[in-house]
Image (tube, rainbow, N blue to C red):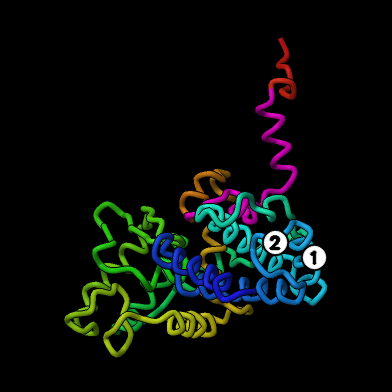
């Protein structure tokens, strides 16, 4: 690849950073995957992006999968390549996307691990009135109450909360904003934390949750505190912040059966992402069918 062809990948990453406002972690993943594609093109003797064909991308996917990359990771690589090639079309460097119809190996749909309601209740039974315990109680309650991602939680400011209305404003992936309900117990825990927060937070710190040094709490600290309380409550499984999100989604679906509603609460752009949480058994689906379909409903006796 010539230097100007490599520069196009940098232009694309700049586009992701400034226009699409993706996170540094996501941009790093794009950079890594595009570097793999560029290296592949050089090994194949492809000198510019205009020479890239669909057969090349099929081989790129096959070589990646054959080299031990998971089906899900191959899907991500191809998705990144398609996004980059669409960017080149926008910039009038390509006329069509050779990756438009390339499919990756099908990834297994593993159900996420979850906590049951009793385990959640044990985990949320945090004792202590000291500031750290109050903070941790509010963190755990909010994670479960609203199904937040870890990055969303640590990025909150007090101005994002409306406890009177029972909502929190969340900035999710791709800087998409959503309003999520906050449950009664989480609101109570947050009020307790806000009452003691000034004693721990530095005066110029805008973060809702802060660490012992008074600055915005880091994701790693939240992970450690979740593990701490899980061990203290005697849970027999590994507990991590995203497990609260899995549990929130599963329990909401079990109660409401409203997949679209849970999609909105979780902030998923695609409903297929939400569908991994559907633990509905076939008997329940069959019952819905029998009760609702005009050709399935049993006739009542005259």
Give the label on residue 96, or none. none
- Residue at the (74%, 21%) spot, across then down: 295
Which of the pair 178/244 is nearer the observer? 178
Indicate which disc, 2 or 1, sits on the residue closer to the N terminus: 2
Which of the pair 156/100 is nearer the observer? 100
For the image, the number of numbered tags is 2
Tell whether 112 sits left or right of 299. left
Residue that mark 1 sits on = 59
Estimate the x, y position of residue 103 in percent, counting from the top left.
74, 55
Q: CA distance from mark 2 to mark 1?
A: 15 Å
- Residue at the (45%, 60%) spot, across then down: 174
Task: Report which quarter residue 66 is drawn in.
Answer: bottom right
Give the label on residue 51, or none. 2
Tell whether 79 sits left or right of 282. left
Q: Is residue 285 magenta?
A: yes
Could you say whether the residue bearing mark 1 is in a helix, strand or loop?
helix
Callout 1: few (<14), some (14-19), or many (20+) C-alpha neighbours within 10 Å? few
Name the quarter where the C terminus is drawn.
top right
Could you say whether the residue bearing mark 2 is in a helix, strand or loop?
helix
Secondary structure character of the magenta stretch overall: helix
Which of the pair 296/215 is nearer the observer? 215
Give the magenta-colored segment's residue range.
267-293
């Amino acid at each position: 690849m010539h230097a100007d062809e490599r520069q196009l990948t940098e232009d694309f990453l700049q586009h992701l950073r400034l226009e699409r406002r993706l996170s540094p972690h996501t941009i790093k993943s794009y950079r890594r995957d595009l570097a793999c594609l560029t290296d592949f093109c050089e090994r194949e003797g492809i000198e510019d992006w205009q020479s890239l064909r669909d057969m090349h991308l099929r081989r790129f996917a096959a070589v990646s999968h054959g080299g031990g990359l998971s089906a899900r990771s191959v899907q991500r690589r191809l998705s990144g390549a398609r996004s980059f090639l669409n960017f080149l079309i926008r910039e009038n460097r390509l006329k069509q996307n050779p990756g438009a119809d390339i499919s990756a190996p099908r990834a297994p749909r593993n159900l996420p691990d979850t906590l049951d309601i009793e385990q959640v209740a044990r985990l949320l039974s945090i004792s202590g009135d000291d500031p750290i315990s109050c903070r941790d109680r509010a963190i755990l309650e909010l994670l479960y109450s609203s199904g937040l991602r870890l990055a969303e939680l640590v990025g909150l400011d007090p101005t994002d909360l409306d406890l009177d209305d029972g909502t929190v404003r969340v900035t999710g992936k791709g800087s998409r904003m959503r309003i999520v309900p906050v449950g009664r117990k989480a609101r109570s825990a947050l009020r307790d934390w806000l009452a003691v927060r000034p004693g721990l937070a530095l005066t110029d710190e805008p973060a809702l949750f802060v660490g012992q040094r008074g600055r915005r709490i880091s994701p790693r600290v939240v992970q450690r505190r979740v593990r701490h309380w899980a061990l203290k409550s005697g849970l027999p499984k590994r507990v991590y912040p995203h497990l609260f999100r899995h549990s929130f989604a599963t329990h909401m679906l079990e109660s409401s059966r409203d997949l679209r509603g849970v999609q909105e609460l979780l902030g998923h752009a695609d409903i297929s992402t939400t569908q991994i949480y559907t633990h509905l058994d076939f008997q329940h689906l069959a019952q819905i069918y029998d009760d609702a379909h005009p050709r399935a409903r049993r006739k009542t006796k005259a």
